Amino acid sequence: MFKYVAKYVDFNGVEKEKDLYFHVSRADLTELELSFPGGMYAILNNIVRAKDNVEISKMLTLLLQTSFGIKSPDGENFSKGPEIYRAFRESPAYDVFFDWLIEADHASEFVNAIVPQEVAKEMEKQSKQIEAGTTTPLN
């Protein structure tokens, strides 16, 4: 899970601070990986190598939509969905977060922080095998 503290001014001119939470579950990550020909990691690596800013932006938006949510006070639940993301996207906190995200290497920091590391390593390994032709996406 990744936490970002957004300091912003709301639409009423009031300064605020809000904790933003992002998380991709094992199931989310598997679904994302299987939804791209050759796997999400292979596609992401190709986009980054090509320095294709349009595709990088699309992938970041997809990851934001998939990962943003509201953590319950007891830490037992993490609620996500289109309406929760829409409310975030329409808030000044989104602008502050997005500005931070596109600075320097924050995008890679963000991606690495939201993904369960053991799953990320396995999927990266599978993507390399797919690229090398030694396996198929469902092996």
Image (cartoon, rainbow, N blue to C red):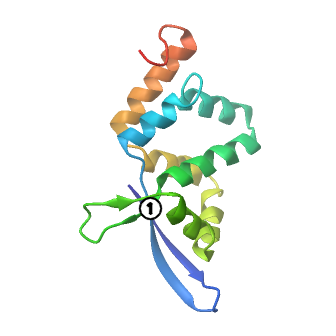
Q: Residue furthest bottom?
A: 13
Give the position of the N terminus as an image quadrant.
Answer: bottom left
* Along the viewing direction, whichever of 30 and 17 lies nearer the viewer: 30
Give the residue drawn at x 55%, y 54%: 64
Give the residue drawn at x 59%, y 47%: 62
Q: Which residue is mark 1?
A: 69
* Along the viewing direction, whichever of 66 and 44 lies nearer the viewer: 66
Against 99, is 130 above or below? above
Give the residue drawn at x 52%, y 85%: 16
Q: Residue 106 placed where, x, y %?
A: 57, 54
Does residue 68 appear left or right of residue 38 in this picture? left
Residue 117 appears in which quarter of the rendering? top left
Give the position of the C terminus as an image quadrant.
Answer: top left
- For badge 1, the amino acid type reads Gly
Against 130, is 67 above or below? below
* Callout 1 secondary element: strand
* Number of residue marks: 1
Q: Is residue 119 visible?
A: yes
Against 54, is 121 above or below? above
Q: Residues within 10 Å of mark 1 (few under 14, many from 20)?
A: many
Q: Residue 43 placed where, x, y %?
A: 62, 30
Q: Residue furthest top?
A: 134
Q: Is residue 105 visible?
A: no
Give the residue drawn at x 49%, y 13%: 136
Does residue 26 appear left or right of residue 104 in this picture? left
Q: Residue 19 placed where, x, y %?
A: 44, 72
Does residue 115 appear left or right of residue 56 in this picture? left
